[in-house]
Every structure is written in C-alpha cells, then in structure tokens.
Image (cartoon, helix red, strand yellow):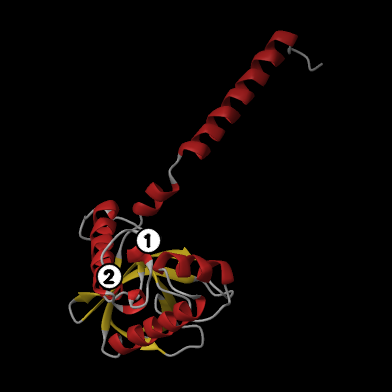
Amino acid sequence: MAKGWTPLTIHISTLSLWHAAAVALWLLLTIDPIGAAERKEWVTLTNCQYVAAKYNDGDSFRVRSGTNEFTLRLYFVDTPEATLTYPERTRQQSEHFGITLDETLKAGAEASERTRELLQEPFVVRTRWASAAGRGRETRYYGLVEVGGKNLAEVLVGEGLAQAKGVAPNLPSGEKAAAYMKRLEGLEAGARQKRLGAWTTSDVQKTKGETK
C-alpha cells in the first residue's frame, strides 16, 4: 500500500471514480442526438444543378454546387424504389401504397423521372450537412430542395410519388418538424383520394373504407 494512503482513503477515491463514471454515462445516455442535430446551422446553396448518375432516384440524387458535387437525400419523404436492391423496403412501400411490387417499381421510375424533370432548372438546396446512409461508400447529405418556388418534397407527395416519411428536422423557417410532417400527410391524403401517381391502382381506399 502506498505511503500515506489508508483503506478509507482508497475506498473514498474509488467511490469518487465510480461517481464520475456514472455521471459521464448518464450524460451520454441523456443527450438527445436529434437535439444535437437541431443545433447544426442551416446552409443555403443557390444555383444548384442536377447531375445524372447511376443511383439517382426520386429522393436521392447527385447535385453540383459551384465546383463541388455531392449526393443529396431529401428530408421528410420516401419515394418508391425503382429496383429490387432493397427488397424489404420495396415490400413496405408496396404495402403502404396498396399496390403490387411491379407497380411499386414503376412508381419508383416515375418518381425518379419526375425529380430529374423538375430539377432541369437551377434550384436551391438547404442543408446542415447531416449524413445519411447510402448504397456506396460516399456520404450522402440530407437536405431540402426548392425549385421554381416550390418544395420538391411537397411536389412529390402531392403528386402521389412519395410518402411522408423519414428524417424530419425543424425547418430553417422555424416551423416545427411535426407540424410540417402533418402538412405533408395532408398532401398525401389528397393524392390518395385523387388516385394520383402510385395511388392510381391502389386498393388502400377500399381497406380504409373510403370511396374509390
């Protein structure tokens, strides 16, 4: 035993270390990762361009901003898959829209084409550079897109080519995520009632007791 140290001193020191460790663990468990993400600053990128790429789809695509290129993943929405690369996700989308797998893939192709079509003119990206999982090694970044004065997510949902689902931060305008998601769900309900996009051949109305 070291000189000047008594069993009591060692016991107290050990308790102090355990207390410090417990406090550190509590902080790690109680820090809200979403809240931490909310503290990231929004960045606005103007005059952005759509870049044709193999893995572009309705809600994820290459973007050029000045001399930089990156892959952007839309916040708030999920468009149907155009391939069976992720069969479980495609199955979920098929069930959500009440359509077959083949019809889901067709809707995914339509969503991809609609996004490409809309983004032929320069557009605005708002992002916090939060990373999103992707197919390859390159990091994708979540963001919002505005083109021709319209929000791309709203257009896709309103045309029946996306569901209101996904990562949902508070908006740069200050609007709360929950409130905005509710608005998107309203647009989705409208597209379902009008049988637009993926809802064209859907049987969801019947299962919900709605009039076709």
Q: Nearer the viewer, residue 35 or 60?
A: 60
- Please state which amino acid type lies under the numbered disc 1: Thr
Quick one: quadrant of the N terminus? top right
Percent x, y for residue 63?
A: 39, 82
Vertical position of residue 160 compared to residue 17: above or below:
below
Residue assigned mark 2: 212
Q: Quadrant of residue 98?
A: bottom left
Q: Position of residue 121 (x, y in %)?
A: 26, 89
Is residue 92 shown to the viewer in this render? yes
Label 1: few (<14), some or many (≥20) within 10 Å?
few
Left or right, 123 with respect to 78, comes to left
Q: Is residue 164 above or below residue 123?
A: above
Q: Residue at x 41, y 80 (%)?
A: 107
36 vs 11, nearest the viewer: 36
Q: Residue at x 45, y 41 (%)?
A: 31
Q: Secondary structure at mark 1?
A: helix
Residue beneath the point at 45% across and 77% down: 104
Quadrant placement of the C terminus: bottom left
**Camera-side residue of 44 and 60:** 60
| Picture quadrant of residue 162 | bottom left
Say above or below: 1 vs 116.
Answer: above
Q: Report x, y in % for residue 35.
A: 38, 47
Q: Which mark is residue 21?
A: none
Q: Residue at x 39, y 79 (%)?
A: 58
Query: On the picture, is 69 further left or further right than 126?
Result: right
- Real-space Cα distance between discs 1 and 2? 11 Å
Q: Is residue 6 visible?
A: no
Q: Position of residue 6 (x, y in %)?
A: 74, 9
Q: Which residue is the site of mark 1?
A: 207
Amino acid type shown at disc 2: Lys
